[in-house]
Image (cartoon, coloured by chain):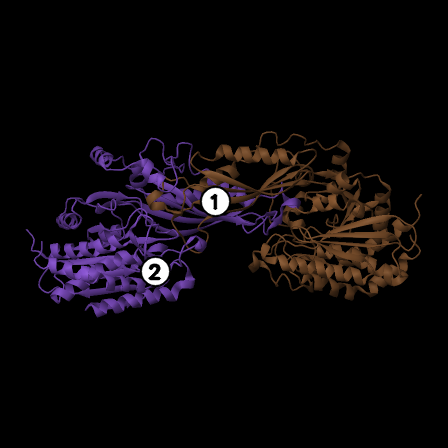
Chain colours: A purple, B brown
């Protein structure tokens, strides 16, 4: 362990309440990136982070993009050392349905849950404001104790992660030299469980599509037209229903091209993980795996591609009843990709399939919502080894090397565009309800997270070899 | 023609602007029955009608029900004569999507449309406030010219027609003697076309159902759960898609029990109507009939049963994208019935079908939204003959005897509960956009409608035989 790390950890423990206050201030800003109504709030969150990083001695800037701005900050090391680029995102998911929140989503609080755990509540508490602040607080503790950082740290905080990161690649491309470091640290993933830290080395890719079917030129009375006029809800339902076969496989031609079978040794490792399918599903009120027949649940969520309708709407959806045949119906549909699946080919196959199902006198429009391939990171590098050791010291047990069903395309972008490996280390838990009402982050996640990054920073500073 | 009818018609022509002002006052009240938020406005519409009828010399009352109130009014004839019960409804459909209205729905106006026709715009202008006021204005003209009505008139105005009429049958049952007349006059239907009046003698029945599928106990992140967790949008889409087969027939077992084939002579009469399938569909931007293969469009909309999804919703439907697997998805589905189809049996078959498609670890709830069988009225009665003659005199061409795809269950209730025949005469046009944005009623419909009722009242007063 780095000689100064123990003092830094002590400082973190002493400063935890102040760390929480700072996180709460950031959580109070409703920086919902996907809804244009919250543009100013996204800018406020970026400005808040810039100010906080500047106060910590970073050269911090807010950098405009065609969408929401990036925050970029740099701080040199006390002496010669490695250079890391930390990535997080300050934007959050929308909060609807608002009525399911037991407290207002942008009024964070520290509460005790039904099991007695202390939790930080509010939108973004876990994804990703709580996570990104673990790293910033670790830097703060190092500065407070030693007056400097022991390694060179750059920080990149994005404001469009929840809306497909449209500005990210152009920004990386335009700022290659500034952003390239020895290794990237990405804090947007979870732990294996409450007691076991994890480093994520496999991530699924994502293709997002929105499809709108228009039949008649206006809404029709179902009494006068019902039976003769095409109903776009029927057309759309058939499209959604036809995306899977009876075995839970996606029906698009060529969909499974580039999907690898899991190596036997990885299958073996996953089988030995303390994981109960019935508990995983039971925690959310389900019992039967819904995915591809013959695959384990971990395979279904980590290593197999999927197709999900994330939203559907058409016709009258208010109180009571309205005998209308809608003019339009629409659905948001996403695909999770693995292996070498090509996002562009899958988008094209989806659109061809939809077009083949739309009657000749109706029409369809598509809207693209992001696309990224899956990524797989090396599991035997020097940085990963040091980080794993630091995590093991913090938690008293080995960090698991895991897959993740979510998509964090930036790790792939860092590799392809900046030739930089990433370490994905995060402290979220599966019951954090990210993207759902009543999102939370365990106080223990926040505290261990800060301490873990402090240890990792110290471990990276130690001379190599 | 009744000797006094010409003076009454002249009075109607002279009073048309005042008639319009009164209609506008009623149209300004947003009496949306299906949305609990508009309860007070429904009560206001009832109170307005009661006051107007009382001013006309009716014994008028507002009668509470468990839902929205009924307006009931009676006025004796000058001398011994027949007794008619007029029925209309003062409630209107919801107005969403509001952004598609070119003027606020509850600010009625007289405009010229693109063809130069003068139209009354606003929600309820055609369905049914404009229609019900044609009868009240005809009574007003008779009173103004002769000081009395030539027949005994009772009026029943309902406030729940657009939300399944839950209070109607109990109300008829509790007030049998008061409401039973020699014949009922129902003004909630349309003309054959702009120049040809019509009496509707066949109406489809209706079964309304709302189905909600719940899978997980909360919304899930599609990255972490996608592939393993059941998606209620997929379940619901398969249910909706499975309701029709490739020939456009409804798949529920027993659905076509009690559906009669159209008698050859009616088929023949319908074939001879000046009706172009391509124009009927083309007017709303469609080309191909979507219903049962091998049936004409008129059969599809008048004499065949249907199933339509009137609304569907689930997951994220706002701006942008959210990679969520929803906990719930729901759909409003209605069936139009013909012949002897039994609403209760069809509701039961639908629920059994849905339950058979819901996975074991998910669950479904149903909400009933009304049910009524189809009705077919006699075409050879004395009242129908007189009314047809009066309509012919007003329009200068014979009234067509037609079917209608909509459901007006009260005609069946009058027959079954009060042993009273109905005449369904209305002046709506197929382009009135009832239940849709920009509802309108032609000024000519309103004017001819008032004159037609004045003629019918006069024709009924003439001694029989």
Residue that numbered label 1 is attached to? B329
State the image quarter where residue A49 is shown: bottom left
Residue B241 lies left or right of residue B254; in this view the side is left
Residue B64's x, y, as percent?
A: 69, 53
From the viewer's perspective, is B278 left or right of A452? Answer: right
Q: Secondary structure at mark 2?
A: loop
The x, y position of residue B52, in whole percent, is 77, 62
Closer to the eye: label 2 or 1: 2
Answer with left or right where residue A134 lies relative to residue B242: left
Q: Secondary structure at mark 1?
A: strand
- Chain containing mark 1: B
Q: How many marks?
A: 2
Q: Visible in this render: residue A206?
A: yes
Q: Name the mark on residue A108.
A: 2
In the displayed structure, A298 sits above or below A198; it is: above
Position of residue A122 measured from the top left corner of the image (x, y, whole percent): 35, 57
A230 vs A265: above or below: below
Q: Residues within 10 Å of mark 1 (few under 14, many from 20)?
A: many
Q: CA distance from mark 2 to mark 1?
A: 29 Å
The one of A215 and B182 positioned closer to us in this rendering: B182
Residue B247 in view of the camera: no
* Quarter occupied by residue A361: top right
Q: Nearer the viewer, residue A34 or A97?
A: A97
């Amino acid at each position: 362990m780095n000689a100064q790390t123990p003092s830094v950890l002590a400082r973190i423990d002493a400063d935890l309440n102040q760390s929480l206050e700072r996180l709460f201030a950031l959580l109070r800003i409703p920086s919902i990136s996907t809804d244009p109504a919250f543009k100013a709030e996204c800018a406020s969150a970026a400005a808040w982070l810039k100010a906080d990083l500047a106060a910590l001695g970073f050269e911090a800037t807010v950098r405009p993009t065609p969408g929401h701005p990036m925050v970029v900050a740099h701080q040199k090391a006390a002496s010669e050392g490695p250079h890391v680029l930390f990535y997080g995102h300050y934007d959050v998911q929308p909060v609807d349905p608002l009525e399911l929140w037991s407290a207002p989503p942008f009024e964070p609080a520290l509460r005790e849950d039904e099991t007695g755990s202390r939790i930080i509540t509010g939108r973004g508490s876990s994804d990703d404001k709580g996570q990104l602040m673990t790293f910033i607080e670790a830097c703060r503790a190092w500065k407070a104790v030693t007056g400097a950082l022991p390694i060179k740290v750059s920080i990149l905080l994005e404001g469009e992660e929840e809306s497909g990161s449209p500005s990210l690649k152009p920004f990386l491309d335009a700022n290659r030299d500034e952003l390239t470091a020895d290794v990237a640290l990405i804090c947007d993933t979870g732990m294996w469980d409450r007691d076991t830290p994890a480093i994520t080395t496999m991530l699924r890719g994502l293709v997002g599509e929105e499809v709108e079917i228009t039949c008649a030129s206006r809404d029709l009375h179902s009494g006068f037209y019902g039976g003769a006029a095409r109903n776009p809800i029927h057309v759309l339902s058939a499209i959604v229903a036809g995306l899977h076969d009876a075995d839970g496989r996606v029906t698009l031609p060529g969909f499974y091209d580039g999907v690898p079978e899991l190596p036997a040794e990885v299958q073996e490792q996953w089988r030995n993980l303390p994981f109960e399918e019935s508990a995983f599903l039971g925690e959310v009120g389900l019992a039967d795996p819904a995915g591809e027949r013959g695959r384990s649940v971990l395979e279904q969520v980590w290593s197999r591609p999927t197709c999900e309708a994330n939203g559907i709407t058409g016709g009258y959806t208010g109180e009571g009843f309205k005998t209308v045949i809608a003019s339009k119906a629409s659905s948001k549909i996403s695909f999770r990709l693995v292996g070498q699946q090509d996002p562009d080919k899958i988008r094209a196959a989806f659109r061809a399939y939809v077009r083949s199902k739309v009657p000749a006198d109706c029409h369809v429009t598509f809207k693209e919502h992001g696309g990224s391939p899956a990524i797989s990171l090396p599991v035997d590098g020097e940085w990963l080894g040091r980080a794993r050791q630091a995590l093991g010291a913090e938690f008293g047990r080995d960090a698991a090397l895991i897959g993740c069903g979510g998509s964090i395309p930036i790790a792939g972008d860092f590799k392809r565009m900046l030739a930089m490996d990433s370490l994905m280390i995060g402290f979220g838990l599966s019951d954090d309800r990210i993207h759902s009402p009543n999102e939370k982050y365990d106080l223990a996640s926040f505290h261990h997270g800060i301490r873990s990054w402090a240890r990792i920073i110290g471990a990276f500073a130690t001379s190599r070899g």
